[in-house]
Amino acid sequence: MTNRSRSFRVPEKPSLDGIEAKWVDVWDESGVYRFDRTKTRDEIYSIDTPPPTVSGSLHIGHAFSYTHTDLVARYQRMRGKTVFYPMGWDDNGLPTERRVQNYYGVRCDPSIPYDPDFSPPAKPDPKRQVPVSRRNFIELCERLTAEDEKVFEGVWRRLGLSVDWSHTYATIDDDSRAAAQRAFLRNLKRGEAYMAEAPTLWDVTFRTAVAQAELEDRERTGAYHKIAFHRDGGEPVHIETTRPELIAACVALVAHPDDERYADLFGSTVRSPVFGVEVPVKAHRLAEPDKGTGIAMICTFGDITDVTWWRELQLPTRPIVGWDGRIIADPPPGVDSEAAREAYAELAGATVHTARERMVEMLRASGDMVGEPVPTTRPVKFYEKGDKPLEVVTTRQWYIRNGGRDAEIRDRLLARGRELEWHPGHMRTRYEHWVEGLNGDWLISRQRFFGVPFPVWYPLDEAGNPRYDEPILPEESALPVDPSSQAPAGYTEEQRGEPGGFTGDPDVMDTWATSSLSPQIAGGWERDEDLFSRVFPMDLRPQGQDIIRTWLFSTVVRAEFENGTLPWRTTAISGWILDPDRKKMSKSKGNVVTPLDLLERYSSDAIRYWAASGRLGTDTALDEGQMKVGRRLSIKILNASKFALSVAGEGASEDPAAVTRPLDRAMLAALADTVEDATAAFEAYDHTRALERTERFFWEFCDDYLELVKARAYDADSADGASARTALLIALSVLQRLFAPFLPFVAEEVWSWWREGSVHAARWPEAAEVRGAAQGGDPGVLAAASEVLRAIRKAKSEAKLSMRAEVAGVVVRGKNAGSARVAEGDIAAAGRTAALEFHPGDETELAVEVTLPEAAE
């Protein structure tokens, strides 16, 4: 705040039109957001930016939550930090595959050879997809994601994200694949990763395994069927089930050990209806005596409880549902009699739904179904991106230990959660509940195509069978590798699939297995150790609340194993966006809104204003009314800044010594309080309070202070006039910087009218410095003077007089009348008041009596 003389470049008619395109280009050319890697770790603020899924279009929820991150980045930059703020693209995985399938009208068939001349259909038909080789399919995925990433980047730039666009990554690029494969090999070497053949939650549409974190319950209608199992010389045993189609997969009946109704059955056997398979009756604590008949059938596998019973009771396996969701052709072990095989043949090849209908008819015909099915509604597990209920099938999969079966690991991960600084704090509870509720390790393999391949081959024995216990692993220096198209060291491609040769692992990693390494990938782990040492562990992980269990937790897991530390110090969790009916927005509900139209109608700063009005962790409704408020605020900043600069004039001083009048000092003292509050709010990751405090002062500044000092500020020859002009410029500089994180385009525009460089590279205002310029001013003086002026205006308005009308007299009484008297001259000029009287008293409230000219006569 020194004495300066400068040339002002204030436009004749300030406007929001076109300022986004103008400043996006300027910022890009000037490199104002470029990361300075010469800085030391304590001079850097690094952000583990969420890599959005590139599979279609961004929606308004993205604009909402990514704005929250940008507010922090801009604030920290103005606080003197060099900000590491990269952008990633999560472009591998099922969402991308689905988009490519529908966009190009193709589907991947790994058995088809590569066609270097392949072109997708001119008129794609999602219902008649053309089969293509895996390599052709991946090429199409890469082509479409590259186009989508350009569109995404354009939206982010338009929104004003202060990302360093020279630091980007994609979860399928060479660096990311190498990092994911390297981390996996190290997990495997340390025993943190392992392969197992076990019951697996399976999506029959996409034919892939699904992890616990990707599940969601959906209410589905069904029916309970009461069915008789038979025992020699005794009454039938009745069970109730919603899945009669799995009777052929039944391996036992189970009841609670304390259920006296079935105590004499424990240890005996019964025969299944229709198929006549002998199965044991077991006791287990998970059986529910008050559910149905109190005894249930255990099938391999109807649900997760079946898996628990099967494992703990050491039962045999009798699977009948295939990977495609249909009943497999060959009957399971135990279905041996001719009658049983004939019955099973009625089910073979049918979907689960059709098999259920056929099984019910067979049970009716055999007399083994008691009464009619009783309708019910129950929660059924789905893959979060799937359309059909999950099945449980036995498959060979890769896992990473995550504490689900290891108390020592679980305790370590819970301790890391307590070390992490959470905003808002209650979100830590969600993390802890997730970790404590895990019932298995993290399944990371997927039976898909566009993903990071597992860097593993298997030798084949003389019969051509893989030796899974002798995996062939590459050297880290060879990464990334693709076992489906590359031969391992010591083999040639001609030995692929041949006895005595090799086969590559056909699976790819779950997308979370790569994005869980986003701090390492973005930070240059094992690729750029100088960069990594400057940014890791990172300062901030911003993200949504719905992926605490996936992205946040899995990133903590990977950093704990590889780095022995938290991946970041702080996490900021955004809430959800709700539609006007207060329902969560989601693509599956069809209520998603894309941001481009809103950006064009209201301006980018207006959208950011709406987003900043939503606190972390709090669900926020899409509110165009708030966007309109943000637009009005932006326009007011343009107009108020033009007015203040016009009044101040190009030769005005910013030397605090020139601020001599009590009202000017009072305004700056109130501004210092605002700076202090806004700074404290930002430090606490409460951007909403920082905005509310800044905005409230700004409107009071415009409505009250500008009106109070307008006449005096135009006095070019007096010290009193110089005091007002200097105070105006000091306040303008501070306000533009306070608004800069929220409204970057408007703040930059008005800054450019009278300052060199970018407001976003300017120093964040210091409360102490502003307080020094206030020279002991009392904010109460401004508050009291403003209250008197508002009372005068109200009296004129109620009398339907012009605000320029003269006032015969004003009498001010009350506790703060003395404070108002300090600004007597400014009140008289602003209110056009001929006579002012002040009578300080002990009353709490300020009382203002206004005598208008007509009343005086």
Image (cartoon, helix red, strand yellow):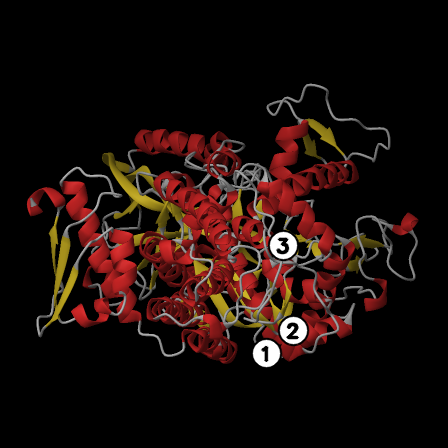
Badge 2 is on which residue?
536
Q: Position of residue 626 (x, y in %)?
A: 36, 44
| Front of the two marks 3 and 2 | 3
User: Depth check: 843 or 460 in front?
Assistant: 843
- What residue is pinned by disc 1? 565
Query: Could you tell me the amino acid type at mark 3?
Result: Ser
Expressed as whole percent of the image width and height from the top left, the position of residue 324 reads 56, 38
Q: In which quarter of the image is residue 531?
A: bottom right
Q: Which amino acid, by three-letter code, is at mark 1?
A: Thr
The alpha-carbon separation of the residues under discs 3 and 1 comes to: 52 Å
| 782 to the left or right of 604 | left
Q: Quadrant of the rendered structure where residue 424 is?
A: bottom left
Q: State the separation of the CA atoms marked 1 and 2.
A: 10 Å
- Amino acid at circle 2: Phe
Along the polypeptide, which appears first: circle 3 or circle 2? Answer: 3
Q: Name the residue under label 3.
A: 7
The answer to whether 502 appears left or right of 825 in the picture is: right
3D distance between C-alphas at marks 3 and 2: 44 Å
Q: How crowded is mark 1: few (under 14 residues within 10 Å), some or many (20 or more)?
A: some
Where 605 falls versus 541 (above or below)?
above
Q: Measuring 60% from the left and 40% from the top, which residue is drawn there?
A: 55
> CB of mark 1 within 8 Å of CB of mark 2?
no
* Crowd tier of the residue under label 2, counting other residues whose Cα lies within 10 Å: few below 14, some 14–19, many 20 or above: many
| Dot 3: element | loop
In terms of secondary structure, where does tag 2 sit? loop
Indicate the secondary structure of the residue bearing disc 1.
loop
